[in-house]
Structures are given as C-alpha cells and as structure tokens.
Amino acid sequence: MSQSPTSQHLAAPYVSLVAVQLFYGTLPVAGKFVLLHIPALALVGFRVGITAAVLVIFQTIRGRVWLAEKGDYWRLAALCVFGVLLNQYLFIGGLALTRASNASILAVTIPIFTLIISVMLRYERLFLLKVLGVAIAAAGVIFLIDPRNASFDSATTQGDVMMVLNSLAFGIYVAVSKDIISRNGPFRSMMWVFVFSSIVAIPVGAVGLASVDIAQIPTSVWILLGYIGIGATAAPYLLNAYAVTRVRPSTVAIFIYLQPIIGVILAVVFLNEQMGASFLLASLLVFAGLFLATRRRELAFQEP
C-alpha cells in the first residue's frame, strides 16, 4: 500500500537525516586514507573549497545566487563560523590532543547543547519525551563506546575541552540556522555558508599543503578528495539544511547518535569486524531514544 503525499512529506526530513549520517559515516574511512598523504588542515581546505565550488556552479545554473535581504549575508557569515570553521578546526585540533573514545563520548553533548540553546532562544518548547529521548539515545551511544575505554585526565584535558567547544559550536549552528535557511532555501544558504568558509579554509589549507609534494599524491587520493567534498560534505550539509527547515533543531541534532551505529555496521561489512550483543542493545537504546524524541508531530515546523 503506497503512502499518501502527506505521509511522504512528513517522512522526508527523517529520511534526509538518516542519509546525512550515512554520508558522514563514510568520512572516517575515506578521510583516514587521505590523511596518509596530506595534512588535516589541507583536507579541510579541499573539503570546504570543493563544496563551495560545486554549490556556486549549481546555484549559478539555477539562477539563484543572491540573497533578498542584505543582512542575511552577515548572518550566513556568522553561521559559517559556528557550523563549518569552528566545527571542523576544533574537531581536528581536539582529536589530535585526546583519545578517539573521548571524542566519541563527548559528541553526545551536541544534541544536548542544541536542545538547551533552542529552548533558551524560544525556538522550541521543552517536552519530557524530547528530554527522555535524548537521554536514552545518549546512553545507547555511551554504552556502545564503553566509557572504560576513555581517559579524561590532564593529558587529554585540552583536547577534551576543544571537543566540547566543537559540540557547542555545532549546537549553536543547528539551533539558530532554521529561520535564515527557511527564508533563503537550503541550497542558496549553504552556498554562501561555504563561500564565506572558503575565505579562511582555502588559504589555511594551502599553507598546510605547502610541505607536500603534490606530484606524489596518488590518483585515488584525488578521487577520494572529490568524494569527501561532494558526498561527505556538500550532500550531508544540504540534507541537514533541508531537514532543519521542517523539524525542530534538536530533532536534527539527535540523529547524530546514529553515526556510531552506522560506523560499526560499516566496519562489519568492509572490515570483517564482529557485531556483539552490546551493539544490539546499544542500537535498541538509540532507536528507542530517536522514537521518543521525534514522537511529537512536526507539523508546526513545516513551511507553508
């Protein structure tokens, strides 16, 4: 039995958010191979620059480049600071100074920050089901990662603080981006976010690339860079922007909890790793949390 157009319209943002996590889930594997040949700052430069170029070309063809309100240029420039520059540089810098398990556990603060900021700015109301859903899903992620593998000591403090600030920056971006993206559309909004981001990321990336012999970079790395720019950056940012215009910001953020689940599944499929009972239990907790957090209908958040 086929779904009604209304049901499909309601499901579209959730399908988009799952796709976002699938795209992001491929980034660690592709990025790890690329980082064997180029520095992290150069990777960010390529990632931001490729995405900006693709979106500029696409929007130029569509004839939808310029914004109606001049003040929105400044607002999108501010969004790029939180959603792209601080997000990516704090994550890379923090990851270099802390353990991967610490970073994974601290990532559960993103939906928490998003929910708090959204409530403080009155973008959404605080519901018990939402809080309970976020808590249960976060518990599932923590259970999967196993806090015993983490080490929050003085040696990792600086990196841990950077990871928390990264979560806060991205939480602010998700919480405050709804209005301006709804007004200008996800494609046009993301184009300007990445154009502004590239003003910083490309020169910094060029400095990082200066010590690399470009002629020695394999063709496979250039192909992966193209995929990272389009498939693991442009696509998820656009889908995220589309979803944030139709559901609550905290709902967008909580889908981040799917990333470790997807990561384990990819490891099983491509790296022949084993999937234990702890993974199944953690998955159940995450999906239960997502169900509760998205239980309230989002009709009030859809564009007319």
Image (spheres, helix red, strand yellow):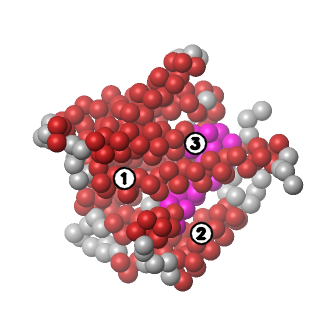
Q: Earlier in the sequence, mark 2 or mark 1?
A: 1
Q: Tell me the element at label 1.
A: helix
Q: Which element type, helix, strand or loop, lies under badge 2?
A: helix
Q: Amino acid at mark 2?
A: Val
Give the camera-side residue of 2 and 35: 2
Q: Which residue is mark 3?
A: 239
Measure the alpha-carbon separation of dots 1 and 3: 20 Å
Q: Is residue 64 above or below residue 196?
A: above
Judge depth for marks 2 and 1 and give the one in front. Answer: 1
Element carrying mark 3: helix
Would you say the magenta stretch is mainly helix, strand or loop? helix
Rendered view: 194 above or below 274 = above
Q: In the shown orientation, is residue 129 left or right of residue 98? A: right
- Which residue is under mark 1? 30
Q: Nearer the viewer, mark 1 or mark 3?
A: 1
What amino acid is at disc 3? Leu
Q: Earlier in the sequence, mark 1 or mark 3?
A: 1
Residue type highlighted by circle 1: Ala
State the residue position of label 2: 286
Left or right side of 99 for 230: right
Q: Is residue 302 above or below residue 68?
A: below
Q: Residues within 10 Å of mark 2 (few under 14, many from 20)?
A: many
Q: Can you give x and y, in whole percent of width and height, for residue 181 in the image?
A: 59, 33
